[in-house]
Image: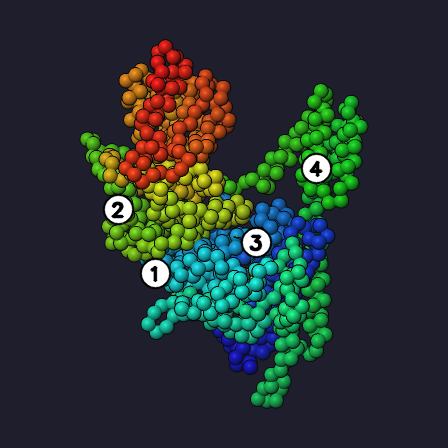
Amino acid sequence: MLQETTTLNTQEITFNDFKTEVLNDYRIAKISRECSLLGRREVLTGKAKFGIFGDGKEVPQLAMAKAFKLGDFRSGYYRDQTFMMAIGALTAQQFFAGLYAHTDINSDPMSAGRQMGGHFATHSLHENGSWKNLTEQYNSSSDISPTAGQMPRLLGLAQASKIYRNEKSVQNKSNFSINGNEVAWGTIGNASTSEGLFFETINAAGVLQVPMVMSVWDDEYGISVHAKHQTTKESISEILKGFQRDNEKNGYEIFVINGWDYVQLMDIYQKAAKIAREEHVPVLIHVKELTQPQGHSTSGSHERYKSAERLQWELDHDCITKMRKWILEFELETETGDTFRFVDGEEDLVAIEKEAKKEVASAKRNAWNAFQNEIKAELSTAAEILEKTASKSENGTFIHKYKKDLLTITEPTRKDILSTLRKCLRYLKEEHFADKVVLQNYIKSATENAFQKYSTHLTSETDLAALNIEEKKPVYAPGKNLVDARIIMRDNFDAILKKHDDVVIFGEDAGFIGDVNQGLEGLQEKYGEIRVADTGIREATIIGQGIGLAMRGLRPIAEIQYLDYLLYALQILSDDLATLRYRTFGKQKAPLIIRTRGHRLEGIWHAGSPMSGIINNLRGIHVLVPRNMTKAAGFYNTLLEGDDPALVIECLNGYRLKEELPLNLGDFKIPIGVVETIKKGTDITVVSYGSTLRIVEEAAKDLNQVGINIEIIDAQSLLPFDIHQDCVKSLEKTNKLLIVDEDVPGGASAYLLQEIIEKQNGYQYLDSKPATLTAKDHRTAYGTDGDYFSKPSAEDIFEKIYEIMHEENPTKFKSLY
Ligand SMILES: Cc1ncc(C[n+]2csc(CCOP(=O)(O)OP(=O)(O)O)c2C)c(N)n1
Ligand SMILES: [Mg+2]
């Protein structure tokens, strides 16, 4: 027995060491379980809002933690509290701070109250936003709630090791990897393996042969829905058997193990880690026979949908109960006749259990007090201000009543405080005295504090924020050196790959042929198959690759072949990438650049410009819409100097147009969030972006001939838009506004309208109705003139502008129709 279990550590250990380790594991399991039990109580008594816990999954997580090494990464889900505790990244007090959603990052290091409890993370960044040395710590990428949403990024986290091991150009990045030895550990619930993202990731990791160990915590249920409705043959390992590697073909190593079997778990996790770490082969561990002692979450009770037999089975197979029994029964007889035991009797375990209970109860109390004390201090300040205001105001009785009501709330929130203060201020609108100013200022500062707590870190707030990267204009040789625009793209990427050792570019057809429009032509040959790579057709995991690689210090440029197919990845972009910095309170980042091409071409799926869906879903990611390849190239150059994620949409019909080749490729930079006036004019301001701009320019010439001089502004950057508020300056001059794009009516044009009219106060300069001209509600018909009749044409633009001018001056601009 001892011989077998020495695999617990790769080195030989003494029985005493082993015993200490086992008992310590038991202690962690009990602490974790106590947290789950008390956590549920906190929800049921109303102190916390919702709880989803790791009870019933403790023992396999101890095994995973033991195989987890410094520099490794986890990408998992809400059941993993025991693992986080075992690697020392979560204390019981932090667990409760998370449950109460304490908005202080020092109390709730997982998300500063921005995520519900059970969503785990470690800190990859220093206070100033720079990278920590990730090889010196245990790392957990920040969890998200959408089931299987952790999968795409897991692929990238694992692939980073492969790149660090095999790509010479990044071997100096010692803060992120030691020879690619790091394993990325995934966890997922059995039911969530039904998601497409799970299968897409599993396949991609098998193809890429990355060091990923994927654990499936199988408790036979997904909330109330049994495995028979979730998984073919009710077994994920059974149906993934075809992925098993053999002598001829690469694939996976697959293990199946019962989740209550401490000894076997320790053994298998060590083996899995070794395979992944040393061979860079992905491993799947199907951990079966797990349970949910308290049901799925605090939202319901599993007695409603589990049979009495099942409930009894769960009791009997509770992994901690089984571990306890094993500890008690363990006996080892040595050659000299001595008998080794872990404990002298049950009382030893009872002592550990009592201690765990005590520790958790006190952690809970401390977390609650820390959470409440902050608010109570604010409450007493607020009450004092109200008291003083009431004594001075003619409406003092009302204010007194509000104050009294506020003080009777047993567990007040900031909302209670601020809402009371704001209501009381209304009673003072006719009065003027010093304490009223104190009240006003307090409301303002409390609102600002709440902003800090709830609304910061949407994008980078560091020196490296993309908005801080200064413009550097393209430089041209004398004489026009006009080339096909795709050459600018290609040569700029060449310069980028040369300048930035850590850039890797990948996507469908991006490698061997150098992308479908040859913007990467010849670069794989020059920089190798790692830095310029083909991928399978799997948009969500292309993005996941990018997220994971960026989280491990590389600078990925992930290519989505066509803008219309970005929708496959929109969920992961929105849920994972766009929220990453926000949901970690600035403690993690993934400066991923996504390259795609779209807008105007032909047909339903190659002409789309679904910009409103994109900009509405991707707050937290910069969205850039360059009108030509020089602009696009300049954006890439800018973004690589910064640490924000961004999406760059190139114009699909622009690669063969002629542009002048800049000399300072890889170096010139287009600023983010700054519009460009590309034609000066006096009569009307026309704001547009992307491919439509060329049509606006065409219409401008025709309009000129009838005496209408339009000003054209290229938005260039939708998120963020026009940070210097240049559009409104144009409106001051023209007093008229038209926004042209090829999104649906009320799409991105409505967003631009809101920005200019409301945010920039453009309404005050208008002397005619602001207008938008967009594509039709339907997608673009494929027929040769389908584009003409589906999207704004030069004639449409001409007539729209002419109509606006006619309205203002019907005698000068006689009606056309
Ligand atoms: C995309 C998505 N759909 C639905 C949900 C709601 N939901 C949360 S957990 C869960 C069940 C997950 O079951 P399983 O993967 O087996 O994990 P377990 O909770 O059993 O450990 C569901 C349906 C969600 N969070 N995300
Ligand atoms: Mg389950």
Q: CA distance from mark 4 to mark 3?
A: 28 Å
The spot of residue 180 in percent (x, y) is 40, 61
Residue at point 59% right, 41% down?
453
Tell me whether circle 2 and circle 3 mark residues in contact (CB < 8 Å): no
Give neighbour class at mark 2: few <14, some 14-19, many 20+ (Cα, 10 Å).
Answer: some
Q: CA distance from mark 1 to mark 3?
A: 33 Å
Residue drawn at point x = 28 percent, y = 37 percent? 784
User: Where does residue 263 sit, x and y in percent of width and height?
Assistant: 56, 75
Q: CA distance from mark 2 to mark 3?
A: 42 Å
Q: Are marks 2 and 1 in contact (CB under 8 Å)?
A: no
* Numbered disc total: 4
Q: Quarter of the image holding residue 733? A: top left
Q: Nearer the viewer, residue 36 or 372?
A: 36
200 lies left or right of 217: left
**Disc assigned to residue 518:** 2
Mark number displayed over residue 417: 4
Given residues 278 and 232, the one toward you in this image is 232
Amino acid at pointer 1:
Asn
Identify whether 576 is placed above or below 379.
below
Q: Amino acid at mark 4?
A: Ile
Examine the rendered structure and indicate whether residue 690 appears above or below residue 119: above
Q: Which residue is mark 3?
A: 119
Which amino acid lies under the numbered mark 2 shown in the image of this protein? Gln
Instruction: Please identify, in this view, whether the residue under mark 4 or under mark 1 is nearer the observer.
Output: 4
Q: Earlier in the sequence, mark 4 or mark 1?
A: 1
Residue tagged by mark 1?
A: 166
Residue 522, visible in the rendered structure: yes
